[in-house]
Amino acid sequence: MEEMVCIECPNGCVLTVENKDGEIIVGNYKCKKGITFAKTELLSPKRTISSIVRTVFPDIPVIPVRVSGDIPKDRIFDVIEEINQIRLDKRVGRGHIIIDNVLGLGVNIIATSSILINT
Ligand code: SF4
């Protein structure tokens, strides 16, 4: 049996996870999200990420961005590398898609600030 901390909410339940004849048995959860979290974490762990994108504008050299949905944990550094390639040359606002379908993962990189258009 192994333990893992559920990161779905601040409760941080310490889940117990056991593989019984191919069936994943999850225990010590306070809600069903814990079961989904543990199974996903074992079979195909995913994460959301936030980062920054460089711009060509000296007044605002970077803006914050995030992925529009969870991505496989083992692709985080690939996605960050893609984000680091960008040098934004348009003044865009919050919600603007900076990279559409990044690396074919089915999620977008979106701006999370309108600082470029509000200055
Ligand atoms: S099992 Fe439910 S209550 Fe516990 S940390 Fe996960 S989401 Fe929160």
Image (cartoon, grey):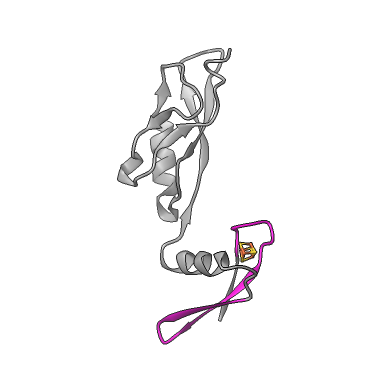
* Quarter location, residue 89: top left
Q: Tell me where residue 112 appears, x and y as whole percent.
A: 53, 31
Q: Work out which residue is located at the far right of the displayed protein and give it.
A: 11
Name above or below for residue 69 compared with residue 64.
below
Q: Work out which residue is located at the far bottom of the displayed protein and give it.
A: 21
Q: Is residue 11 magenta?
A: yes
Q: Residue at x 66, y 67 (%)?
A: 13
* Quarter location, residue 60: top right
Q: Tell me where residue 14 appears, x and y as whole percent.
A: 65, 70
Q: Is residue 61 magenta?
A: no
In the image, 9 versus 86, the foreground residue is: 9
Q: Work out which residue is located at the far left of the displayed protein and give it.
A: 104
Q: Residue at x 50, y 48 (%)?
A: 48
Q: Tell me where residue 30 appears, x and y as whole percent.
A: 65, 69
Name above or below for residue 72 compared with residue 67.
below
Q: Tell me where residue 62 appears, x and y as whole percent.
A: 53, 24
Left or right placement of residue 11 versus residue 89 in this view: right
| Quadrant placement of the C terminus | top right
Name above or below for residue 116 compared with residue 20.
above
> Ligand 1 sits in which quadrant?
bottom right
Q: Residue at x 49, y 22 (%)?
A: 93
Q: Residue at x 43, y 81 (%)?
A: 23
Give the residues drawn in magenta, as a range: 6-27
